[in-house]
């Protein structure tokens, strides 16, 4: 869905921190947000966009407008700290470009996503190999694999490894900010509480549930970790406003979390219904075709991962079994076919 880019918006937390939300077109037609924090220790930038096309230019223009349009005594070179909420390209891919523009700043991320920044080339190689094995076991036709893998790697070609200066873990306090580790969508995703405002990254979004992928591709992703992280945030009180990495601000966090949990359960049930209505066992590729029949191109790759995350969750918890064990015994990376137990 094409989204309209808005102007920089100003919010303020109960602790007096001034929060500026800066829009960027991180992918064509897809808007993401970076956040400038003033009053939470040193000037801090949370996320840097994708570095794709005009993303960095829009971020730097937004930072410049904070002085001219909002009256802050601030220039981009004042930024002394950059926090990356999680290791997805639309949130960290512009880091090299931004650091070139603002000069030196300390960079921080959760330890589980640290290698994505510091050993990027290695990370892409290993993740691509894991994805290849996953797609083969998902039953993707061999002739389709090269195109899917090329799409996976295309958006990552412009990124380079960067050093980091500090890590942020669950429960850490940093200049009045509290860190929550909220995996599922990404291994090392964090949410940041600033007074009564929560920067939720992609964990809690106003209109959509975040993309989930199987833990067999990357540890600490998947449905189980996402539900656990939602439950963690459901226990947090005192949040007046949630600002996500995409979409609109949220004024009732607990209600939105309840909606997201219900949506996850509906998708799990959809997998069960597909298998109940099938006369034969099905591969993840076949389940994806029935669950997301309208997805094509890169969105088809995302759908294959999403459907696989729900299959993995149900299989790990004993709701499904593999129906073609003889094939699995005889062939490496054979397609797996699932049935209900």
Image (spheres, rainbow, N blue to C red):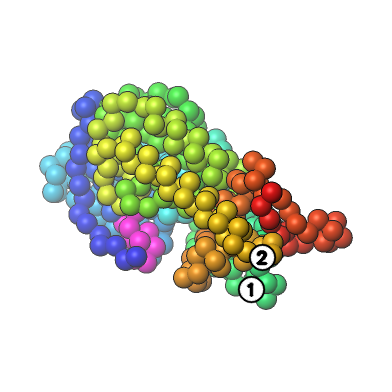
* Residue 27 within the segment the image draws in magenta: yes
CB-based contact (under 8 Å), mark 2 and mark 1: no
Alpha carbon separation for disc pair 2 and 1? 25 Å
Query: As displayed, is residue 134 above or below residue 13?
Result: below
Residue 262 vs residue 188: left or right?
A: left
Q: Main secondary structure of the magenta part?
A: strand
> Dot 1: what SS?
helix
Residue beneath disc 1: 144
Q: Which residues are magenta?
A: 24-32
Q: Quadrant of residue 152?
A: bottom right
Seen at 49% across and 39% down, the residue is: 227
Seen at 29% across and 30% down, the residue is: 239
> Dot 2: what SS?
loop
Residue beneath disc 2: 279
Residue 96: image location, x then y, percent: 45, 51
Seen at 61% across and 52% down, the residue is: 311
Query: As displayed, is residue 168 above or below residue 307?
Result: above
Residue 21 vs residue 231: left or right?
A: left
**Which residue is at the far right?**
330
Q: Quadrant of the N terminus?
A: bottom left
Residue 217: image location, x then y, percent: 63, 51
Nearest to viewer (mark 2 / mark 1): 2
Residue 39 in sight from this viewpoint: no
Seen at 24% across and 39% down, the residue is: 251
Residue 68 vs residue 319: left or right?
A: left
Q: Earlier in the sequence, mark 2 or mark 1?
A: 1
* Residue 153 within the segment the image draws in magenta: no
- The local crowd at label 1, few if under 14, some if 14 to 19, many if 20 or more residues have their Cα within 10 Å, is few
**Which residue is at the far bottom?**
143
The foreground one among 201 and 10 is 201
| Number of marks present in the image shown | 2
């Amino acid at each position: 869905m094409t989204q309209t880019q808005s102007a920089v918006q100003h919010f303020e937390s109960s602790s007096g921190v001034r929060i500026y939300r800066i829009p960027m077109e991180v992918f064509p037609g897809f808007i993401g947000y970076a956040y400038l924090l003033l009053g939470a220790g040193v000037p801090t930038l949370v996320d840097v966009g994708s570095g794709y096309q005009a993303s960095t230019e829009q971020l730097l223009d937004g930072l410049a407008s904070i002085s001219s349009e909002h009256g802050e005594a601030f220039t981009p070179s004042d930024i002394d700290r950059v926090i990356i909420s999680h290791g997805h390209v639309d949130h960290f891919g512009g880091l090299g470009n931004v650091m070139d523009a603002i000069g030196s700043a300390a960079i921080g991320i959760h330890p589980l996503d640290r290698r994505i920044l510091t050993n990027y080339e290695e990370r892409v190689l290993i993740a691509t190999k894991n994805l290849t094995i996953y797609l083969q076991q998902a039953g993707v036709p061999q002739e389709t694999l090269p195109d899917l893998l090329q799409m996976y790697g295309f958006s990552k070609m412009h990124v380079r490894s960067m050093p980091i200066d500090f890590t942020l873990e669950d429960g850490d306090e940093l200049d009045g900010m509290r860190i929550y580790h909220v995996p599922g969508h990404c291994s090392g995703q964090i949410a940041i509480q600033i007074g009564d405002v929560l920067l939720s990254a992609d964990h809690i979004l106003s209109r959509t549930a975040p993309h989930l992928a199987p833990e067999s591709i990357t540890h600490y992703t998947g449905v189980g970790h996402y539900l656990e992280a939602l439950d963690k945030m459901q226990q947090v009180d005192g949040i007046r406003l949630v600002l996500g990495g995409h979409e609109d601000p949220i004024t009732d966090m607990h209600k939105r979390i309840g909606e997201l949990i219900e949506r996850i359960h509906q998708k799990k049930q959809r997998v069960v219904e597909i298998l109940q209505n099938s006369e034969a066992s099905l591969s993840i590729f076949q389940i994806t075709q029935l669950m997301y029949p309208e997805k094509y191109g890169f969105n088809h790759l995302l759908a294959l991962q999403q459907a696989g995350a729900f299959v993995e969750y149900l299989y790990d918890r004993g709701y499904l079994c593999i129906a073609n064990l003889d094939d699995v015994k005889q062939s490496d990376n054979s397609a797996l076919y699932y049935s209900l137990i």
